[in-house]
Amino acid sequence: MQKVSIFVDVQNIYYTTKEHHNCNFDYNVFWGKVTSNREVVKAIAYAIDRGDEKQKQFQNILRAIGFEVKLKPFIQRIDGSAKGDWDVGITLDMTEYAKFSDIIVLASGDGDYDLLVSKIRKDFNIPVEVYGVTKLTAKSLIDSASKFISIEDDLLLK
């Protein structure tokens, strides 16, 4: 059995599926696909904590599926902009768990991860599957992946 580590950029997946498909990502179906005939080494969902009850329920659902949920506080700046990304955290964890994995799965459309995906493929000689909404995923990330899987009907909650 292949050993898989799974990393989900929750905010990116939420906003891209909402914008393009006007519905939500189906984490249960996703889990079934990426873990089929694979042994899970690590599965982490990275989210922003706004402290609301609905979000806490969603995070508990992710935990029940099998994800470790890492939270970062939502920061509202004085100028009205907001901060709350997990780029560095995801990078550190993917690099760490690549040592113990036969394959990495990343769910995100963020082009900032293209160098990371390329580096993991080169340095660890393992494939990286990327899941994202095609029209809202950076071409550089799609090109750097061993395999790109578009988030379409079968991965959406209707």
Image: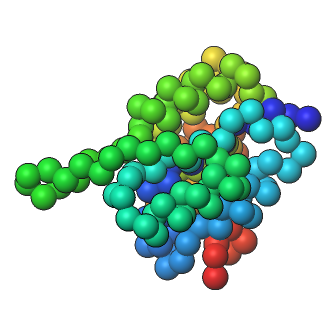
Looking at the picture, does residue 72 appear above or below residue 25? above
Q: Position of residue 130 (x, y in %)?
A: 63, 47
Q: Quadrant of residue 61?
A: bottom right
Q: Residue at x 36, y 58 (%)?
A: 51
Along the viewing direction, whichever of 98 and 54 lies nearer the viewer? 54
Q: Residue at x 60, y 22 (%)?
A: 96
Asked whether, in this view, residue 60 is left or right of residue 42, the answer is: left
Looking at the picture, does residue 32 appear above or below residue 145? below
The image quadrant where one finds the C terminus is bottom right
Q: Is residue 140 visible?
A: no
Q: Residue at x 74, y 64 (%)?
A: 29
Q: Quadrant of residue 23?
A: bottom right
Q: Position of residue 70 (x, y in %)?
A: 49, 42
Q: Position of residue 10 (x, y in %)?
A: 50, 54
Along the viewing direction, whichever of 142 and 26 lies nearer the viewer? 26
Q: Residue at x 54, y 63 (%)?
A: 58
Asked whether, in this view, residue 5 is left or right of residue 23, the answer is: right
Residue furthest left in the image: 79
- Number of numbered discs present? 0
Q: Position of residue 41 (x, y in %)?
A: 74, 33
Along the viewing direction, whichever of 75 and 4 lies nearer the viewer? 75
The image quadrant where one finds the N terminus is top right
Along the viewing direction, whichever of 64 and 42 lies nearer the viewer? 64
Asked whether, in this view, residue 51 is left or right of residue 34, the answer is: left
Q: Quadrant of residue 145?
A: top right
Residue furthest bottom in the image: 158
The structure's colour scheme is: rainbow
Q: Is residue 85 visible?
A: yes
